[in-house]
Amino acid sequence: MKKTMKMNANQLRSILWFLTVSLAVYSSTVLAACSNNDNPAKGKVSEITERGTLLVGTTGDYRPLSFCEEDGTYWGFGIEVAQEIARCLGVGTEFVKTSWPTLTADVMAEPQTFDMAIGGITITDARRETMLMSEGYLANGKTILCRASETARFQSLADIDKPEVRVMVNPGGLNEKFANANLTHATIIVHQKNEEIPLLVATGEADVMITEITEAPYYVKTDARLAAPLLSTPFTHGEIGVLMRKGQEDLMETVNKAIRKMKADGSLRRLHDKYGLVYAYGE
């Protein structure tokens, strides 16, 4: 009987030793994995925190989402979202000028000129095929600006798609793509500077501007000569997000966490209210 108890005790010690060794190996593996993720030499987030600055590409021509004043000061809804993302990273923010025609090339450039792009960038399947896009933080959709005196004239896409209607768009973006695909009879005019088009419509240089529900209310509010008669019935529906290159999944995770935090704590809704934009993410 004593011999049996002694064997059981030996077996118990062997089992405990095996469990202790296994636990030590498992813990080492987990710690090693965490160390790799936190290694300053690896990952985009580590690179940004080491640098101390989040480099943000933005067009600076898209009121009220991203606009650059003559003195180089940036302001807008997207600019404030970028600054909140930088705060979550514990770093400062530096804005780098890009353009709609060169946006994809600038995101993919080697060496990188910025870490991510923001400001009126619609989430699309085409962009997601070659790049990363965050969760949406702003509802979006195509609409028009026209002269307030001609609101009755433009009540549908068919009203716009006529040879005598001059439709103005900025080059290289989804506005031009939408116009080319849907307005086969209208006279399409491509104007280089997006921020100048509302004034050109107001003064009669064009009849209609293809724009977004995020941009149109600002110009209607700031120029009584303009109207957005189809604002409540946009031609398309989508969301705006943050764009970055593939391989930066750690940064995208941080960006998504920042967007979720802003939705949860009410700061995103307050930002919508500040810029007169429609909030589409519940209470």
Image (spheres, rainbow, N blue to C red):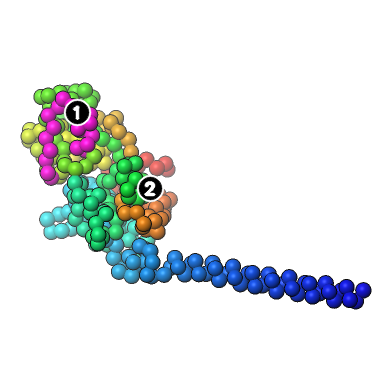
Which residue is painted at 27% across and 51% down in the image? 118
Q: Is residue 198 left or right of residue 274?
A: left
- Left or right: residue 11 compared with residue 142: right
User: Which quadrant of the figure has residue 5?
Assistant: bottom right
Read off the residue under disc 1: 183
Q: In the image, which disc is placed on residue 253?
A: none
Q: Quadrant of the C terminus?
A: top left
- Report the magenta residues as a range: 175-193
Residue 228's quadrant in the figure? top left
Query: Which quarter of the rendered picture does the N terminus lie within?
Result: bottom right
User: Residue 265 location, x and y as percent?
Assistant: 41, 52
Magenta span has 184? yes
Residue name at image x 16 percent, y 38 percent: 169
Q: Amino acid at mark 2?
A: Glu
Instruction: Identify the residue position indicated by label 2 in the image.
Output: 135
State yes or no: residue 281 in magenta: no
Residue 31 appears at what percent x and percent y? 52, 69
| Earlier sequence position, callout 1 versus callout 2 | 2
Q: Is residue 155 above or below residue 200?
A: above
Task: Quote the CA–CA distance across marks 1 and 2.
Answer: 30 Å
Residue at 10% across, 33% down: 206
Residue found 65% across the figure and 73% down from its top: 21
Determine whether 119 is above or below 161 in the image.
Answer: below
Observer-nearest of 244 and 257:
244
Counting other residues with Cα less than 10 Å from the Cα at mark 2, is it few (<14), some (14-19), or many (20 or more)?
some
Residue 226 sits in quarter: top left
